[in-house]
Image (cartoon, coloured by chain):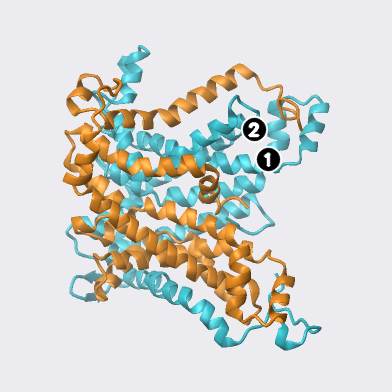
Chain colours: A cyan, B orange
Amino acid sequence: MAVFSARGAAPRAIDARRASLGILVAFLAPALLVYAGFTVYPVLRTFYNAFHTIKPHSVVEFVGLGNFTALLSADPVFWKAVTNTALFTLVATTVDVVGGLALALCLFARAPLAPVLRVVWFTPVLMSYVVAGILWVWIFDYDWGLANATLRFIGLGAWEQSWLGQPSTALWSVLGAHEWKWLGFNMIVFLAALHALPSEVLGAAELDNCGWLAKLVHIIVPMLRTTIVNLTVLSFIGKMMVFDLIWVMTGGGPLWSTETVSTYVYKRAFEWNTFDLGYPSAIAVLWFAIILAFVVLITRLLRPRDRLEF
Amino acid sequence: MGATARPGFERVRRIPLVLFAALYTVLAGGPLLWVASMSLRTTAEIFKDPYGFPWPAHWEKFADAWFKSNYHAYFWNSAVVVVSAVALVTVVGAMAAHCLARYGFRGSRLVRFLILSGLILPPQLVILALFQILLDIGLYNTLTGLVVVYVATHIAITVYILEGFFAQIPQDLFDAARMDGYSDFEIFWRVTVPIGAPAIFTAVTLNFIVLWNEFLFAVVLLTDDDKRTLPLGIMHFTGSHQLDVGMAATGLMIAIVPIVVLYALFSETMIKGMTAGAVR
């Protein structure tokens, strides 16, 4: 990592760590230009938008903090979206980390056919959210869906639901679909971390006649701390921005019960005929600030010394 | 190791473990088999018995979806967009990663921070402004515009994966190449790229899968039916065949099959690629 190395010993001409400005520009310019034009500039423009009302045909009006005050004080849909997203994030992140670890331990403890199961369990991760969403809309179909059919088959027909059709179950159903699609990812990451653990430590615990639950709590979880923190942060960011699956499965309905911040941003920008990009930009900016604050908080709380890595 | 169980895990009770593993396998794989079966059956057959065996198999449904609906166009659009975007982002990303990993220069930390901060950028923070920008420059509702956006938004992860690997290539190789009179560009092309090939392959795999499945940017930046990429096409097709579940399942299967075939052939590479950002 010696970025500024002087390398006094080697003659300048053959020091491979040095390059002329022209060379540096040639290597960096393509990436930086595209990145500046289509990522950095849009971010700045979104911040600008957040303080304006942006109507079609370049009609721009400065409103100061108007969008933010309207958002925070007079927008019940926004608050509903925040509540839903917070609940979704909290539960899904927990399930992601705990479930992923459980699946990984299952394979690590040498379940039969573990190498095959690992490949099968990961398959849903490769599906697009559109494919997973449509598939789960069918699974939750009232008349012929797999969910109700299974309940009837095992004699719990009384529990059958219109899973996505009623506000009380819709968010949980989407959450279930999300975990189906995503758990395999966390499983693989945990499995890689488990295999990297020094086997002597586990062996020593075995000699001490340590039960597997005690070993899990006192040895494995502490040793996997870095992985757990990384996955929590990664999971958290993903859930706070959840859009695709909800858009495909419910579109935010019924009765705002699955509305998330991201779907609301999309609706305010492109579906409601408010023709104002300023207000949804303000939502996006505020939400980004909140995500960032929580990422810093989680990282500080769980891992005081090291810096954040992905 | 050699023993039948890993040290310390003999004590996990076997029966619950096996049951759980079997249950989760059914849960993970079952839904996909169900769609596969439905894709070969007519809607009438499905409504009579949603879980029947696909016999006789109606293979002609695939030809119908492909030619009579717009599926061939969706597939082609996705292929063009994803291949172009992945090729471009790999080239510009590798060049930038090589530069950051190899050369010490004033400002390198700033450049690295600027690019890598893209890793945690929510798409929602750029999507509205990108909509405006592409409208301004006439690239809204074009595949070119989508390619540019895909390249820009995936530079961060590409540089992140490649720089980490490139930085581990021994400096001696570069010193020797310089001694032999290689130019800077030759060093990149004939040292970094061949040695960094595994990481480049990983980045390509990750970007390919992510972009093949990408939905949000595409749904905001494209409107014409004949420009839709596969995820938009599938959604449109399913929406317009809501009562024709059999046909919708066939459409879904067209999107699933290529991924599953690739996965069957390159499962390790794809697993490694997808988790490259999280596993070091």
In this view, B189 is above or below B83: below
Q: Is residue A292 left or right of residue B84?
A: right
Tell whether A43 sits left or right of B106: left
- Residue B85 place in picture, x, y as percent: 39, 63
Q: Which mark is residue B9?
A: none
* Cβ atoms at labels 2 and 1 below 8 Å apart: yes
Q: Is residue B173 above or below residue B157?
A: below
Q: Nearer the viewer, residue B49 or A218?
A: B49
Amino acid type at image mark 2: Phe
On screen, residue B172 above or below B2: below
Label 2 Cα neighbours within 10 Å, binned few <14 / some 14-19 / many ≥20: some
**Circle on res. A108:** 2
x and y percent of residue A25 in the render?
53, 82
Find residue B200 and report its image quarter: bottom right
Can residue A257 be spotted in the picture?
A: no
Report in which chain the residue with disc 2 lies: A
On the rendered structure, is A92 left or right of A7?
left
**Residue at the disc numbered 1:** A195
At mark 1, the secondary structure is: helix
